[in-house]
C-alpha cells in the first residue's frame, strides 16, 4: 500500500472512532445521562456545547503543537484524553462532574478530530495531501453510520455508563495503536515538497492574509452553524414543512449518505474542478434546497435533504483544502485552529438558536441558514483565485 493511502486509512479510521464517541454520542446517550444525573436534557446538551467551545479555544495551541511535534503525538494524546473524558463521564453523578467530563472531552476533540488529522497529513505529504484529505472525510463520514448502532447496542447491554467505558476502551485498544503507526512528520520539516509548480514566496503577513483568514473563518462558521442546526433539528423541520413523522425521520436519515456522495463527487472531479469552485457550488446547495422547501413544502423535502447533505460533505473537504491552497503547509495546524475557532462557537450556539426560531416560525427558520449560505457564497467569491502551490520547505 502506498504511504499516502496507508496514512489516510489510519487517520480516517481514527476520525470515525473520534466522532462516533464524542460528536455523535449525545444523540443516543443524552436522555439516559440526564435521567441518571438529575440534569435536564437541555443541560446535558449545554455541557456538550461547552465541549465544542473548549475544542475551539484549544484548537490554535493544539494545531501549533502538531506543526512543531507532528500529528502522531498529538493524535495519540487525543486518544488518552478521549478515554479519560469518557471514563469521567461514566463516573459523573451531578452537574459539576458532567460539565467537567465534557470539558475534558472538548480538549480531546480539539486534539483529535478533523483539524488535527488534516494537519498531520499535510505534515507528511505537503500539497500532495489534498486527495488524502478527501479520503479522510470519506472514512469519517461513516462515524454516525457505525457509531449510533454501536452506542445503542452498548447502552442496551451495559447501560449508558457502560457504553462510555466501552468507547474509552476502544480509544485505548484501537485508536491509540492506529495513531502510533503513523510516522512522526511535521509541516515545517518533513512535508513532501510540491513538484508541480515552481517555488513561490511565503504568503505575506499583511492585510491580504488577514482578509483571507476572516473570509474563510466566516465561511466555515456559517457552514458549521447550518450543519449542526440541521443535525439537531432536521426531522422536526421536515415535520413543520408537512411531512409525517415516519417520513421525516426516513428522509432525514439520508443526510449521511448525501454527505458521502458529495465527497465522492468531489473526489471524482478532483482533477477537473478547482477546490474554490467546488466550495462555491457546495455553499449554494443549502440555500437552493431551502428555497425549494419553503416554496414547495413537503414534496421538496427529499431534494432539500440531499442538497444540504451533499453541500455539507463538500464543505468539510474545503475546510482542509482551502487553507492549504491559500496559505501553504507552513503553520497549517495552527492556522486550522484559528480558522475553526468561530465555527466551534457557532456550533455551540446553533441547536439553541435554531430551535428557538423553529418554535416561533416553523420551517421559516430556514430563512436564516439560507441567507447565511448566500453570505458564505459571497465570501468565497471575494477570496479570488488562490496562489500557485508552494513547496512546504520554502523559507520565509
Image (cartoon, helix red, strand yellow):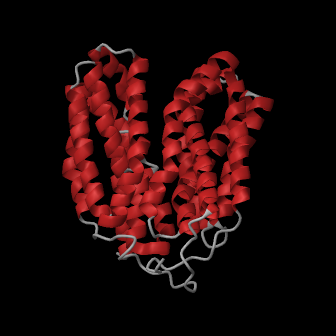
Q: Is residue 254 visible?
A: no
Q: Is residue 233 left or right of residue 117?
A: right
Q: Is residue 244 left or right of residue 59?
A: right
Task: Name which residue lies at 53% across and 66% down.
Answer: 324
Task: Name which residue lies at 31% across and 39% down.
Answer: 105
Residue 301 image-quadrant placement:
top right
Residue 279 spot, x, y in % from top left = 65, 57
Q: Is residue 92 visible?
A: yes
Residue 370 spot, x, y in % from top left = 71, 38
Task: Name which residue lies at 58% across and 50% down.
Answer: 217
Residue 41 image-quadrant placement:
top left
Q: Is residue 348 left or right of residue 64?
A: right
> Which residue is at the far front?
206
Residue 207 spot, x, y in % from top left = 63, 61
Report the front residue among 107 and 114.
Answer: 107
Q: Is residue 360 left or right of residue 105?
A: right
Task: Name which residue lies at 66% across and 62% down.
Answer: 276
Residue 201 spot, x, y in % from top left = 56, 79
Q: How many marks?
A: 0
Q: Is residue 304 above or below residue 70?
A: above
Question: The N terminus is located in which quarter?
Answer: bottom left
Report the front residue among 374 and 177.
Answer: 374
Q: Is residue 23 above or below residue 320?
A: above
Amino acid at each position: 500500500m502506498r504511504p499516502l493511502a496507508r496514512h489516510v486509512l489510519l487517520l480516517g479510521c481514527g476520525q470515525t472512532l473520534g466522532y462516533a464517541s464524542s460528536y455523535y454520542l449525545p444523540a443516543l446517550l443524552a436522555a439516559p445521562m440526564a435521567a441518571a444525573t438529575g440534569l435536564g436534557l437541555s443541560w446535558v446538551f449545554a455541557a456538550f456545547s461547552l465541549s465544542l467551545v473548549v475544542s475551539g479555544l484549544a484548537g490554535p495551541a493544539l494545531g501549533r503543537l502538531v506543526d512543531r511535534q507532528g500529528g502522531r503525538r498529538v493524535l495519540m494524546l487525543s486518544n488518552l484524553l478521549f478515554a479519560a473524558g469518557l471514563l469521567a463521564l461514566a463516573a459523573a453523578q451531578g452537574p459539576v462532574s458532567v460539565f467537567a467530563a465534557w470539558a475534558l472531552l472538548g480538549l480531546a476533540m480539539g486534539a483529535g478530530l478533523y483539524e488535527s488529522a488534516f494537519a498531520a497529513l499535510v505534515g507528511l505529504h505537503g500539497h500532495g495531501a489534498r486527495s488524502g484529505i478527501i479520503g479522510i472525510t470519506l472514512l469519517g463520514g461513516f462515524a454516525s453510520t457505525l457509531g449510533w448502532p454501536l452506542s445503542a447496542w452498548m447502552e442496551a447491554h451495559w447501560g449508558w455508563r457502560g457504553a462510555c467505558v466501552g468507547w474509552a476502551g476502544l480509544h485505548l485498544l484501537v485508536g491509540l495503536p492506529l495513531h502510533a503507526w503513523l510516522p512522526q512528520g511535521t509541516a515545517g520539516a518533513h512535508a513532501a515538497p510540491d513538484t508541480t509548480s515552481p517555488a513561490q514566496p511565503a504568503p505575506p503577513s499583511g492585510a491580504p492574509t488577514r482578509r483571507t483568514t476572516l473570509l474563510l473563518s466566516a465561511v466555515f462558521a456559517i457552514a458549521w452553524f447550518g450543519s449542526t442546526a440541521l443535525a439537531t433539528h432536521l426531522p422536526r423541520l421536515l415535520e413543520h414543512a408537512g411531512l409525517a413523522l415516519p417520513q421525516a425521520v426516513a428522509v432525514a436519515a439520508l443526510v449521511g449518505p448525501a454527505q458521502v456522495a458529495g465527497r465522492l463527487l468531489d473526489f471524482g472531479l478532483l482533477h477537473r474542478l478547482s477546490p474554490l469552485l467546488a466550495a462555491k457550488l457546495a455553499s449554494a446547495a443549502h440555500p437552493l434546497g431551502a428555497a425549494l422547501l419553503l416554496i414547495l413544502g413537503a414534496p421538496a423535502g427529499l431534494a432539500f435533504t440531499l442538497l444540504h447533505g451533499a453541500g455539507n460533505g463538500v464543505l468539510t473537504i474545503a475546510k482542509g483544502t482551502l487553507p492549504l491552497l491559500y496559505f501553504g503547509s507552513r503553520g497549517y495546524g495552527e492556522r486550522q485552529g484559528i480558522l475553526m475557532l468561530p465555527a466551534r462557537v457557532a456550533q455551540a450556539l446553533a441547536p439553541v438558536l435554531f430551535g428557538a426560531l423553529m418554535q416561533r416560525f416553523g420551517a421559516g427558520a430556514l430563512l436564516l441558514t439560507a441567507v447565511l449560505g448566500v453570505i458564505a457564497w459571497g465570501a468565497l467569491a471575494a477570496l479570488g483565485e488562490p496562489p500557485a502551490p508552494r513547496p512546504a520547505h520554502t523559507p520565509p
